[in-house]
Every structure is written in C-alpha cells, then in structure tokens.
Image (cartoon, grey):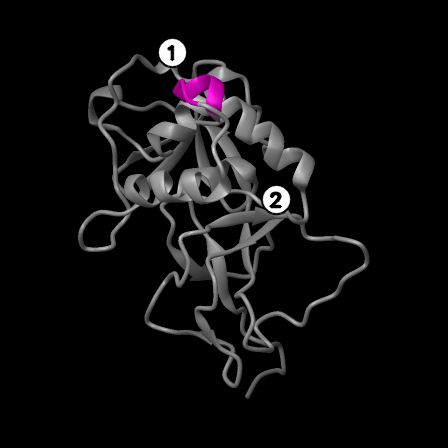
Amino acid sequence: MTGSRKMPLQNRVTPFGDIIAITQRGSMMGNRGIIHDPSTKTLLKKRWSSRAWIICVCQYKNVRRDVMARRSWTELFFLDEATALSAGHRPCFYCQRKRAKEFQSFWADGNGTQLPSAPQMDAILHGERLDEKGQKKHHRLRIALGELPDGAMLASGANAYLVKNGTAFLWSWDGYSQAEIDISKVTLLTPPSIIQTLKAGFKPLLASL
C-alpha cells in the first residue's frame, strides 16, 4: 500500500449517459433512482430504476448526504447542466422548483404542447435517450451547426462536443476547449425534445469555456 487515499466512487455522468469513476467533481447532482449497493458503495448492474432522471443542486437547505451510504436514491454528478441534459436528465421539481418550472414552460413552447407534467416529460425522454438495448441513443443531426441552440451536445466517435454561438467545444471533465469537427460525421446526443426546449429559450448552466 502506498497511501490511504480513497478510490473515487462510480457516480460521475458523461454526456453519453455513462457513469464512471474519476477524481474530478461535478457542479450539479442528480439521480435515476436506486442503482447502488450501500454496503459496498458500488453500482448495481442496472443503470436506472426510475424513468425520472433528474438534475439536482449540490446544496439544498443545509441537507447533507453521505454519498451512496444508504438504500436511497443514488447520487450522481455532472460537470454542468448541459452535460446532464445531454444524458437525458431534466431539472428536479423538489430542490430547484423554479428552474424546473422554467424548463417545463420552455418545453411546452418548444415542443408545441400544453404544459407537461413531470411524468409526461419523463416518458418522452425515456424513449429518446435509450434504444431497445438500453444504450444511449444518438440522433441524426438534421440542421446546420449554426442552427443548433447553445447547450446542445454532439458526438463524434468517443468525444462529446458542446455547441455555443454556432461553435463546437470539446467536452472534458476539466471543462471545454474549442475544437474543429467534421459536421458530416457527428450525431446529436441531447434528446430532441430538449433541443426544442433549448431553442425555445431555456439557457443551460455551463462550465466555464
């Protein structure tokens, strides 16, 4: 043994929706239900137990949780809100109700619907984020890069890219860096209904560029 430093828990979520173990911390928290064993603080084989994939704040009314310590929802962490949206999560109506209602309103405007309930949004997102094998869906990009809203996420191979002001930025756990991409070879990671929500005016919180 060379030290007593604890190994990081497997609870950081990428724009692809994968849950990995790294040392970097996220700026936002969320969950997909109970998907861990509290006795070992390790993930179960399943990667969700609820269709309500939500985005939470890391601090709420001085409540403190020992991560993965009990059989309650599994704490997951994201670089920023755009990353969480790309993975198919939406704002939580409990810990950030104002933000969730803002998202709900822009969803209705962007998708041409009446104000949806949380379960209605969850049902649509569940169909958009996972394929029949339970893998993250990559959607065909049908518009030009410059027409994508700020906060949209693209994929090219194993890399994810954030779009801001018509420019692509390479995503990493350390933040974003400007990059050149071949638009003919990318797919859309952010679910279509969330793309419409962003186009309607919802502004996701971003890590510094």
Q: Residue 81 carries which label?
A: none
Q: Disc 1 marks which amino acid? A: Glu
Residue 194 in the figure: left or right of residue 158: right
Q: Is residue 17 visible?
A: yes
Q: Which residue lies furthest to the front in this view?
A: 114
Position of 158 relative to 38 (above/below): above
Q: Which mark is residue 93?
A: 2
Q: Is residue 6 magenta?
A: no
Please tell me which residue is depicted at 25% across the width and 32% down the height of the picture. 139
Please tell me which residue is depicted at 40% across the width and 32% down the height of the picture. 161
Indicate the position of residue 149 as horizontal and vertical percent values. 45, 18
Indicate the position of residue 61 as horizontal and vertical percent values. 80, 54
Q: Residue furthest left?
A: 132
Q: Is the magenta stretch mostly helix, strand or loop?
A: helix
Which residue carries the number 1 mark?
Answer: 147
- Is 4 or 143 nearer to us in this picture? 143
Please tell me which residue is depicted at 46% across the width and 53% down the height of the picture. 13
Q: Give the range drawn in magenta.
A: 108-113
State which quarter of the image contains the N terminus.
bottom right
Indicate the position of residue 205 as horizontal and vertical percent values. 60, 32
Q: Which residue lies furthest to the right in this view?
A: 62
- Is 157 or 140 nearer to us in this picture? 140
Q: Does the magenta stretch include residue 109?
A: yes
Position of 199 relative to 46 (above/below): above
Q: Distance between the residues labelled 1 and 2?
A: 30 Å
Residue at disc 1, secondary structure:
helix
Please tell me which residue is depicted at 52% across the width and 65% down the height of the picture. 74
Q: Earlier in the sequence, mark 1 or mark 2?
A: 2
Indicate the position of residue 52 as horizontal and vertical percent values. 46, 51
Crowding around mark 2 (Cα neighbors within 10 Å: few <14, some 14 to 19, many 20+) is some
Q: Is residue 207 visible?
A: no
Position of 54 relative to 42 (above/below): above
